[in-house]
Image (cartoon, grey):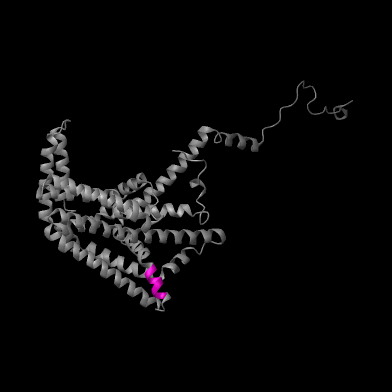
């Protein structure tokens, strides 16, 4: 037969083994995905995600530190608005128009802040030089006592601590020169003006502003936004109101104790106790050290120990009895978290950052606690197993 008459052998004829299947693109993609499914792949994925989150936080932090003239007044206005929003709501329920209720609350707050600033300027700034000199003299006396202790403390360590205290008490960030200088700068005036204007609109249109921001969301996400906003507002307001009450009690209690012991400069020390109470953990310690140093020079070592005992007792009673009542669940943060927040806030924005860091951290934690429901935290924050001591 010719070539056209021959039968074409079937495919695969003459082969001894089965033909291997051709690799499919889906199999190739599946093989590539397996590279990210093992332990190293998961670690790599999480590392990339962590780097992305850290980068975003760093960018926002960098921008915030460059725009402190706007960011800090807005944050202060937000905290103050959360603190006095119950007053605005109360006045509105009493029948006052929204604008009148807002102006009444704003003027009340400005009057209180002005009274505090006047008290600080009158009681602290006028006597700051004397207070500073007595604190430094007290440190020198304490240095003499320390040198007689049985355990060894080198002269270099004492000198280093003394220089740190001198730099703090004589720095431009403390004292009448700082307050007078800051109050005369254009930045302070501009920041205060921005804070007042933003505070006014937060009080007047705060709920409407939050509703505007929630417009892109619907259903469950919208309810989550409302829930988180309400929880954050209550946390900020409760923190400021509770801290103010605790600060007043600390200042009055410690001031009475200082007066009984016979310590001079009772009013300036009490005002500093009130101001430092807004810095958790660290503030009470600084106030106690300063009061003890002044007492050591002005009265004597035994009275200084009595002042230390008074500060410890007042802070212990406040922490065990008063703070749980006035703060409730507002500040349910571990002391280590508070310390990290204080450090980060101080590095980013100085004293203002130290004051604002803790309420912001408490608000973030409260938002996480109500993320999936009124009493249902976000999935990553839920307790997975029993916690044992």
Residue 283 located left or right of residue 232: left
Q: Is residue 138 above or below residue 330?
A: above
Residue drawn at (23%, 59%) of the image: 252
Q: Position of residue 273 (x, y in %)?
A: 22, 55
- Residue 161 visible in the current orientation: yes
Give the position of the N terminus as an image quadrant.
top right
Q: How many marks?
A: 0
Residue drawn at (19%, 66%) of the image: 118
Farthest residue to the right: give it.
Answer: 1
Q: Is residue 236 above or below residue 283?
A: below
Q: Position of residue 386 (x, y in %)?
A: 50, 41
**Residue situated in front as seen by the camera: 271 or 185:** 271
Residue 350 located left or right of residue 1: left
Task: Give the quarter of the image for residue 270.
Answer: bottom left
Main secondary structure type of the part rendered in magenta: helix
**Residue situated in front as seen by the camera: 352 or 370:** 370
**Residue situated in front as seen by the camera: 315 or 347:** 315
Q: Is residue 9 magenta?
A: no
Task: Give the quarter of the image for residue 366.
Answer: bottom left
Farthest residue to the front: give it.
Answer: 260
Residue drawn at (88%, 29%) of the image: 5
Give the position of the C terminus as an image quadrant.
top left
Farthest residue to the top: give it.
Answer: 16
Q: Is residue 250 above or below residue 26?
A: below
Magenta stretch bounds? 86-92
Residue 8 located left or right of residue 90: right
Q: Position of residue 22 (x, y in %)?
A: 69, 32
- Residue 166 visible in the current orientation: no
Residue drawn at (65%, 38%) of the image: 26
Q: Is residue 90 magenta?
A: yes
Q: Position of residue 243 (x, y in %)?
A: 32, 58
């Amino acid at each position: 037969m010719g070539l056209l008459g021959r039968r074409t052998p079937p495919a695969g004829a003459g082969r001894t083994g089965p033909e291997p299947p051709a690799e499919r693109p889906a199999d190739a993609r599946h093989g590539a995905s397996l590279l990210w499914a093992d332990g190293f792949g998961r670690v790599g994925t999480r590392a990339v995600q962590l780097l992305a989150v850290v980068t975003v936080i760093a960018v926002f932090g960098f921008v915030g530190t460059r725009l402190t003239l706007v960011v800090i007044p807005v944050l202060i206005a937000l905290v103050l608005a959360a603190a006095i929003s119950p007053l605005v709501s109360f006045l509105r329920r009493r029948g006052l128009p929204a604008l009148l209720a807002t102006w009444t609350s704003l003027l009340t707050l400005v009057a209180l802040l002005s009274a505090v600033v006047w008290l600080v300027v009158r009681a602290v700034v006028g006597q700051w030089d004397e207070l500073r000199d007595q604190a430094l003299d007290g440190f020198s006396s304490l240095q003499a006592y320390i040198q007689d202790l049985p355990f060894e403390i080198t002269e270099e360590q004492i000198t280093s601590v003394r220089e740190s205290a001198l730099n703090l008490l004589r720095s431009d960030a403390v004292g009448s020169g700082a307050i007078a200088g800051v109050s005369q700068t254009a930045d302070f005036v501009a920041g205060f003006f921005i804070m007042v204007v933003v505070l006014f609109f937060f009080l007047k249109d705060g709920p409407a502003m939050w509703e505007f921001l929630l417009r892109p969301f619907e259903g469950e996400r919208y309810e989550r936004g409302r829930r988180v906003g309400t929880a954050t507002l209550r946390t900020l307001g409760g923190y400021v109101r509770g801290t103010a009450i605790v600060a007043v009690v600390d200042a009055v209690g410690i001031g009475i104790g200082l007066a009984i012991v016979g310590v001079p400069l009772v009013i300036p020390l009490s005002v500093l106790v009130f101001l430092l109470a807004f810095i958790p953990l660290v503030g009470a310690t600084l106030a106690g050290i300063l009061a003890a140093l002044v007492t050591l020079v002005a009265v004597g070592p035994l009275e200084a120990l009595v002042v230390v005992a008074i500060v410890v007792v007042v802070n212990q009673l406040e922490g065990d009895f008063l703070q749980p009542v006035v703060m409730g669940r507002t500040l349910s943060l571990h002391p280590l978290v508070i310390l990290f927040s204080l450090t980060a806030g101080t590095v980013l924005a100085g004293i203002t950052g130290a004051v604002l860091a803790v309420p912001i951290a408490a608000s973030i934690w409260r938002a996480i606690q109500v993320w999936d429901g009124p009493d249902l935290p976000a999935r990553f924050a839920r307790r997975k197993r029993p916690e044992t001591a």
